[in-house]
């Protein structure tokens, strides 16, 4: 009588000194005190239902502590507390009970599982969307049949469309594995058709998990996935080993074991009547061993013929762990459909990646295409003009903190800087080396090294950040398979703009007319009053300026260092040569071909990017052998260069 009286007095005192709601959880716990202290899996549901029905905000905290075995009970009063540190279950405030005797409440694994399912229901309806997402992540990691009810119950009140869609998909996946009837499971599986998520595919693969089996006759209760033929689907040695493991066949004896058995049974210089000196062939040793086996001295040997006979008596198969054939048939059909869709979308994603890479190569190469095509100059410093443009963008961001505005300003400034540098290089170096390609190559290579060192002296050796505006963060996700970053989309759009701009300049302006005239026939152009020397200067400056703008765009995507130009100079030359020297459309075609080729090789060999580069170069060498003038050949001076 003392313990109930003490508990009553404590509750009365709590009621005097605290609001009504603050003592309600303890009251509910006391009404189920024995069940809370020693819960059972089948009976604990009543306690949990009452706790959930109360709507108290303390309930989820109590369930977490109860599941985590952090609840203790005062044996004198019967009241429950949280342990380490000792806290009140209603207020959460720390309490000091002195030297009272506390007993830990330790629910077993089954009870903790039931409590966990109740916790999921709270988390799935939590006002904080991040907690709801965390709960969904936890369900996806450890799916269980008990989660179907709480998940379905949380759907009606879900306000976020994305979370709602994910809840519905998770319900479908749980029902596909743990549905109450075959019809429910098949319907849930069919609803997964069209989903490209990894979770959906993982669910179907789990349903289609198989295990190996062997029997003289396959039992009717086994859901067979496929029959295995020894020698085709499974090695004969492995198949016979399975029979031995299952106790269906005697183990085969190795040559070494046969020799040991014969050596142990030598009597009077012979084994089973066969002289030792005659045991120099496998056939004679097997004959001697067989005689010993007939005498019962050693276990009988299994010959190849006998092993084949034994194998023919048994059927080897793979059986689904899921015994319901209707469920596995539906899962096979839906998984095949999903894998087809995934393959199509992976191809689309690969095409987007190739298109994005092609736009980067086009931006990097278009300036080189102009200078190389019109002037026949092998400019090894072209990559450094790209680097100068990227560093110009970095400097603009240091001056203008607004990333969008700094990017807008950086584009024309980078063009001006690299245009001036290109004109200076043409006037000081290139103009004296026309028609001397080897000297031009060596001179521009030396300038390339000098510009790299100058950049190191000014900006250091560490990579500098060229930060993209916030509206370029993230990616456009079309579905779970196909996505492309906004920066790559921006580079692609910029490449299209430059394609249109270059075509306009070359086809609709006087400068473009003069450039085309000098390209096709410089002597005739000079006789018509065009100054080829001036056109060469402006053309080289234009190509260098475009490289600077490309550097700003590439800097948003790649690292900005003094060596970044070296990463693009080889691809730029390959793009120009493959596409066709001096032709804008040829450069576009070359960039597209190289982009598709590189991404295709990387897809087939994703773990070795160096091998992908090597294969690509080999392909281009072979391509040039069959089409030396490139995809789009150009007549005139460029073709003769």
Image: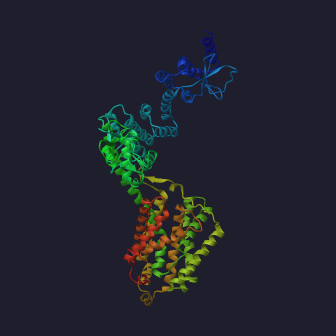
Q: Work out which residue is located at the far bottom of the displayed protein and give it.
A: 527
Of residues 538 and 611, the one drawn nearer to the viewer in this rendering = 611
Of residues 177 and 191, the one drawn nearer to the viewer in this rendering = 177
Q: In this view, does 345 lie above or below 246?
A: below
Residue 163, quarter of picture: top left
Position of residue 533 measured from the top left corner of the image (x, y, whole percent) = 50, 85
Q: Can residue 37 be seen in this view?
A: yes
Q: In this view, does 274 lie above or below 148?
A: below
Position of residue 539 measured from the top left corner of the image (x, y, whole percent) = 49, 79
Residue 501, quarter of picture: bottom left
Q: Residue at x 29, y 42 (%)?
A: 313
Of residues 473 and 191, the one drawn nearer to the viewer in this rendering = 191
Q: Is residue 156 above or below residue 389?
A: above
Image side of residue 177 versus residue 63, left or right: left
Q: Is residue 139 above or below residue 466?
A: above
Q: Residue at x 41, y 56 (%)?
A: 349
Q: Work out which residue is located at the far top of the displayed protein and give it.
A: 1
Q: Is residue 228 visible?
A: no
Q: Residue at x 36, y 37 (%)?
A: 322
Q: In which quarter of the image is the C terminus?
A: bottom left
Q: Quadrant of the N terminus?
A: top right
Q: Work out which residue is located at the far right of the displayed protein and give it.
A: 98
Position of residue 89 measured from the top left corner of the image (x, y, whole percent) = 60, 25
């Amino acid at each position: 009588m003392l313990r109930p009286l003490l508990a009553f007095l404590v509750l009365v005192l709590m009621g005097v000194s605290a609001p009504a709601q603050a003592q309600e959880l303890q009251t509910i716990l006391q009404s189920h005190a024995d069940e809370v202290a020693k819960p059972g899996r089948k009976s604990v549901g009543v306690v949990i239902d009452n706790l959930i029905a109360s709507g108290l905000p303390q309930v989820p905290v109590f369930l977490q502590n109860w599941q985590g075995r952090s609840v203790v009970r005062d044996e004198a009063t019967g009241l429950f507390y949280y342990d380490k540190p000792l806290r009140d279950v209603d207020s959460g405030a720390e309490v000091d009970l002195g030297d009272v005797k506390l007993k830990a409440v330790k629910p077993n694994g089954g009870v903790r599982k039931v409590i966990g399912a109740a916790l999921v229901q709270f988390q799935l309806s939590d006002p904080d969307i991040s907690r709801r997402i965390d709960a969904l992540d936890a369900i996806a990691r450890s799916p269980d049949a008990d989660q179907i009810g709480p998940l379905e119950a949380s759907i009606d009140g879900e306000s976020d469309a994305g979370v709602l869609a994910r809840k519905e998909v998770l319900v479908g996946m749980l029902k596909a594995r743990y549905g109450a009837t075959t019809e429910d499971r098949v319907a849930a599986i069919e609803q997964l058709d069209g989903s490209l998520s990894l979770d959906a595919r993982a669910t179907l693969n789990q349903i289609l998990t198989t295990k190996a089996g062997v029997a003289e006759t396959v039992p009717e209760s086994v859901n067979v996935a496929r029959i295995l033929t020894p020698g085709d689907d499974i090695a004969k040695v492995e198949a016979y080993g399975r029979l031995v493991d299952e106790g269906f066949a005697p183990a085969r004896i190795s040559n070494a074991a046969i020799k040991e058995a014969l050596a142990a049974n030598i009597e009077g210089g012979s084994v089973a009547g066969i002289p030792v000196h005659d045991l120099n062939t496998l056939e004679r040793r097997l004959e001697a061993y067989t005689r010993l086996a007939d005498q019962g001295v050693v276990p009988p040997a299994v010959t190849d013929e006998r092993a084949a006979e034994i194998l023919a008596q048994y059927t080897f198969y793979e059986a689904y762990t899921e015994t319901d054939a209707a469920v596995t048939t539906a899962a096979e059909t839906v998984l095949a459909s999903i894998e087809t869709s995934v393959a199509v979308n992976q191809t689309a994603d690969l095409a987007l990646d190739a298109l994005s890479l092609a736009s980067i190569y086009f931006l990097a190469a278009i300036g080189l295409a102009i200078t190389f095509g019109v002037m026949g100059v092998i400019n090894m410093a072209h990559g450094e003009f790209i680097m100068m443009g990227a560093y110009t963008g970095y400097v603009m961001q240091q001056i203008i903190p607004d990333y969008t505005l700094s990017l807008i300003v950086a584009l024309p400034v980078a063009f001006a800087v690299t245009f001036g540098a290109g004109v200076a290089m043409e006037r000081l170096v290139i103009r004296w080396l026309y028609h001397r390609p080897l000297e031009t190559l060596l001179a521009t290579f030396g300038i390339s090294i000098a510009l790299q060192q100058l950049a190191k002296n000014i900006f250091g050796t560490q990579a500098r950040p060229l930060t993209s505006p916030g509206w370029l963060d993230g990616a456009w996700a079309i579905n779970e398979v196909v996505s492309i970053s906004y920066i790559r989309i921006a580079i692609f759009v910029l490449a299209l703009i430059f394609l249109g701009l270059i075509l306009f300049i070359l086809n609709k302006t006087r400068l473009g007319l003069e450039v085309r005239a000098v390209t096709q026939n410089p002597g005739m152009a000079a006789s018509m009053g065009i100054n080829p020397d001036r056109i060469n200067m402006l053309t080289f400056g234009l190509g260098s300026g475009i490289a600077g703008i490309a550097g700003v765009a590439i800097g948003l995507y790649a690292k900005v260092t003094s060596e970044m130009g070296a990463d693009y100079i080889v691809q730029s030359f390959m793009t120009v040569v493959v596409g066709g020297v001096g032709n804008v459309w040829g450069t576009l075609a070359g960039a597209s071909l190289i982009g598709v080729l590189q991404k295709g090789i990387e897809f087939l060999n994703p773990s070795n990017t160096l091998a992908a580069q090597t294969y690509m170069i080999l392909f281009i060498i072979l391509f040039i052998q069959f089409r030396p003038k490139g995809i789009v050949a150009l007549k005139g001076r460029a073709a003769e260069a």
